[in-house]
Image (spheres, helix red, strand yellow):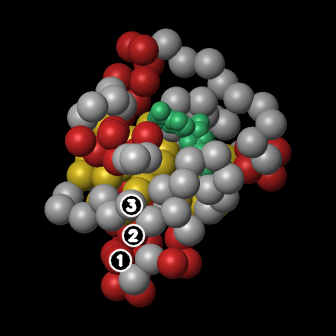
Amino acid sequence: MSSIFSKIIKGEIPSYKIVEDDNYFAFLDINPNAKGHTLCIPKVEVDRIFDLDEEVYMGLMQFSRKVAVAIEKTIPCNRVGLSVIGLEVPHAHVHLIPIESMDDMRFISKVKMTKEEFEDLAEAIRSNL
Ligand code: 5GP
């Protein structure tokens, strides 16, 4: 069975997409720690990030870096934090989170955003790529 993220890649489940290329896809996390919290995923469906082929893994990091730079240009923040967890969705993904303090990386306080805010933010980050 396809992971929820594979369904997002195929467009079977909607997402606030930022960018995709042949191998990777970036979209806003639906339950963000902070505005701009983004997930970068490989199109190949592999659960654990360190099980990815080295080339795919390195490509994911390169792709994530480009997206992180665009997030930093878009959202006032101390910096963009990067985290890999993967306990909820078994499809490797990189969390990019604009942070002010360590608390923003702790996945305990969440921000609510409207559909329009998600759409506008995805578009703003895209325009800074
Ligand atoms: P993890 O697997 O790293 O523990 O967490 C999975 C992340 O994916 C969570 O931050 C969660 O909010 C996000 N997530 C889960 N389902 C969806 C979804 O359907 N759409 C989006 N955009 N994010 C999701």
The numbered mark at residue 81 is: none
What secondary structure is marked by label 3? loop
The numbered mark at residue 45 is: 3
Q: Residues within 10 Å of mark 1 (few under 14, many from 20)?
A: some
The image shows residue 62 at horizontal and vertical percentages of 37, 73
Quadrant in the picture for residue 54: bottom left
Where is mark 2, residue-wise? Answer: 60
Depth check, mark 1 against mark 3: the one in front is 3
The numbered mark at residue 56 is: 1
The residue sitting at the front extreme is: 1
Q: Which amino acid, by three-letter code, is at mark 2?
A: Leu
What secondary structure is marked by label 1? helix
In the rendered view, tell whether residue 47 sits above or below residue 9. Answer: below
On screen, residue 91 versus residue 84, left or right, reads left
The image shows residue 118 at horizontal and vertical percentages of 42, 24
Say if mark 1 contacts mark 2, CB within 8 Å.
yes
On screen, residue 55 versus residue 4, left or right, reads left
**Residue, x 29% and y 45% (percent of image)?**
9
62 or 74: nearer the eye? Answer: 62
Depth check, mark 3 against mark 2: the one in front is 3
Task: Specify whether residue 125 is in view.
Answer: no
30 or 37: nearer the eye? Answer: 30
Depth check, mark 1 against mark 2: the one in front is 1
Dot 3 or dot 2, earlier in sequence = 3
Separation of marks 3 and 2 at Cα, in angstroms? 13 Å
Q: Which amino acid, by three-letter code, is at mark 3?
A: Glu
Quarter, ligand 1: top right
Q: Residues within 10 Å of mark 3 (few under 14, many from 20)?
A: some
Task: Specify whether residue 103 is in view.
Answer: yes
